[in-house]
Amino acid sequence: MSTGENEKKKFTYYPGCSSQGSARHLDESLRAIAPEIGIELEELDDWNCCGASVGHIGGGQLPNMALTGRNLAKAEAQGPQDVVTGCAACYLNTHAGNEKIKSDVKMRRKVNEALGAADMSYDGDLQVRHMCEVIVNEVGVDKIKERVTNPLKGLKVAGYVGCQTVRPFAGTDGGGAYDTYEDPEFLDDFTEACGAEAVEFDPKTSCCGGSVAVMSPDRTLHLIKKIVEAADEAGADVIATPCPLCQTNVEMYQDAINKKYGTNYQIPVVFYSQLMAVAFGLDAEKDAALHRNTIRSEKLEQMAKK
């Protein structure tokens, strides 16, 4: 690799709940590529859910904020380094919660009162960041290009960013100002740095239905169809995304779309980190975790090192 050990930037890594199940391939591939591009990830000790799935059920804002506060208190105990996550929902909740705790004295007091039951507290001194922003601002696309030993020549990729990775923080100073809300380019830049072709893809920030798709898929199939249809029309071999829920929804519901609309879609949906792992010449299963995709990409697997 081109980055020396002494140049690695250290972060406290918050994997999030999806890393234990539906998005294990994001977690495994991120852990594999991080040291290759000069990032050291130290997993957050004894982390908990960010509240994206359970924090809005009832009880007001405090339960959600307390979940975030606990993670941040644990992170603060590990050191002053920034907290980074690869999950869009974890980033949205944790970053927003962190900013609220920093700016709202009353909320910070309430959160610390709740944390006090476990002899914990959070001073509000950390920065929460998304892995894509870290790669853009701390690593740079040129460093990715330098690391590539197995360019993905001939692979056409539709870069599907989704909603939460860029909204509402991407264009702000607090969010690293690494791209725009409506027409982000970082995912296409990652794709091209890996030697693949980023196809024209208009619905790159369209909603996939989010958690509504999990509870009431019939209400969101038309949203997912729009995404898959655009990728198909662009001739994409794969759809790449940074978001665990986007990856699950767009991959999982293609059969339902085919049944309802009489289509025949079977487009693989991968994580950008899986593309990087393959382009870096890492192991197809251990590092790129290609075996965890429900719709397998034969073309990408053929490119991967065994």
Image (cartoon, rainbow, N blue to C red):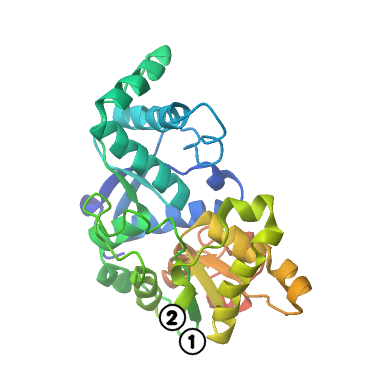
Q: CA distance from mark 1 to mark 2?
A: 6 Å
Which residue appears at 29% of the width and 23% of the height? Answer: 106
Which residue appears at 25% of the width and 39% of the height? Answer: 81
Residue 296 placement (x, y as % from top left)? 65, 70
Instruction: Answer few, some or many: residues within 10 Å of disc 2's Cα (few below 14, many 20 plus, some between 14 and 19).
Output: many
Quadrant housing residue 200: bottom left
Residue 146 placement (x, y as % from top left)? 29, 72
**Residue that numbered label 1 is attached to:** 154
Residue 123 placement (x, y as % from top left)? 25, 26
The quadrant in which the N terminus is found is bottom left
The answer to whether the residue labelled 1 contacts the one labelled 2, judged by CB atoms less than 8 Å apart, is yes
Residue sitting nearer the eye, 203 or 303 = 203
Query: Measured along the vertical axis of the image, is residue 75 above or below residue 94?
Result: above
**Residue that numbered label 2 is attached to:** 196
**Of callouts 1 and 2, which one flags the residue occurring earlier in the amino acid sequence?**
1
Q: Specify the amino acid type for callout 2.
A: Ala
Secondary structure of the residue carrying tag 1 is loop
Q: Is residue 18 left or right of residue 1?
A: right
Q: Specify the amino acid type for callout 1.
A: Gly
Q: Which mark is residue 128?
A: none
Which residue appears at 53% of the width and 55% of the height? Answer: 244
